[in-house]
Image: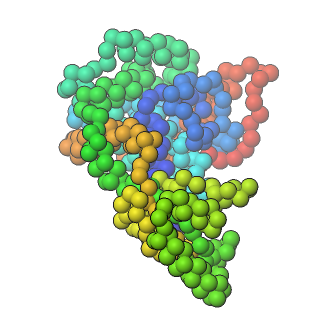
Amino acid sequence: MKNWKRLLALLLSGAMALSLFACSITANPTSGDPSADPSAGISSPNPDASASPAIEADLSQGVLEFSAGVSPTDAMLTINGDEVPADLFLYMLAMNCMNMQSYLPYFSMTLADIADTLLEESISMAAYHVLIRQQAAKLGCLPTDAQNAEIRTAIDEAGLEDNITPYWGLTADSAEFLFAMDAYYNNVLDATTHAPSEQELADYMDEQGVYRVKHILLKTVDDANQPLPDDQIAEKKVQADDLLAELQAAEDLPTLFDQRMNELSEDGRNDDGTLAAPDGYLATAGQMVAEFEQAGRALKDGELSGIVETTYGYHVLLRLPFTDEDKAQYKEAYRPAALDELVAQWQEEAVITRADALSSLNVSDFYDRLAAYQQALAERDAPAESAAPIESGGVG
């Protein structure tokens, strides 16, 4: 697939965002559920039925000793002198593996194929959170007593000794790190960013390439996206010219545009024949085909385009002002985006050193062995009458 690297990068950035706010600590990292809620807390042991039957877990070893040949407190990275222990880093790596696993079959790929990318994204994730903590200390915005009390309660409810440590090898310190991510992030967010002014919001939306348009589409391709016969394409061009002339002469352009859009547009429609997007599209850079985007972004609010030809056919666009909901959406995203820019700068300036254990880590082997260990542990601890049957199949 031509754009698989870009698509994988987007999925990985999604995985990183899911893990940004702590505590997706489950006993089953291999379920591959892309909608996993990172604040869902601890689930009961539920072994993955696809764990490789060729791996026999040695439960006399700790989970990280068996899956990665390390102890929980072994340093995997140092970031500005602060160590990232193996248990914390490998948890983040496992979360990225979990989030990617369900998507890989669409690319005919396995975890082994993107192991280097997964490793680098996990290093970036670890650096992100460590740098947030370091900045919280510098800025004097460490978690409050109330926040610390909530963190301790969450860890107690999750069950450090019964759930977290046996299945993940996480120490109390690393569990605290994960459960405290929300507090550190929010405190640094409040200390370093501000709500945007109207002009700042407008500039931010422009930087993101955001625009809202309605369009009337006269298709020059069939339902299989194959070109229509030349004579039919010529007829569509004449129809488009006539439509544009009528709209340009309209005394009430918005009303006439909506009328002709509902009558003529061959954009997506519902089963009852109504347009699927009667209020138009809120789009960002790269979302629409290039000709459509270029035309839409060039218009001012209320302006009509000329005839815009794309691979789908002939379009006439009407630029729309942003709604209050549109602005609210990007106003909410403004501050996190501003903090992300700061963290990117901190990462560029950070001194990050990788330990030998990280350099020799086999990502897919680690994840397979982790899954096998957790499955064996869950089977051992589950009552005999409730043990789930195990199916064969490989992980990743």
Q: In this view, does 139 lie above or below 198?
A: above
x 61%, y 57%: residue? 106
Decide which of 298, 64 is in the foreground and name it: 298
Q: Which residue is drawn at 49% across and 13% down?
A: 156
Q: Nearer the viewer, residue 184 or 315?
A: 315
**Residue at image point 58% right, 39% down:** 35
Q: What x and y, as percent, mark residue 214? A: 51, 60
Q: Residue at x 54, y 74 (%)?
A: 243
Image-based side of 285 in relation to 200, left or right: right
Visible residue check, residue 131? no
Q: Quadrant of residue 189?
A: top left
| Of 268 and 8, the residue lying toward us | 268
Answer left or right for 82 relative to 121: left
The answer to whether residue 362 is above or below residue 313 is above
Asked which quadrant contains residue 330, the reply is top left
In the rendered view, tell whether residue 38 sits above or below residue 6: above
- 62 on left or right of 143: right
Vertical comparison of 336 with 229: above or below? above
Identify the coloring: rainbow
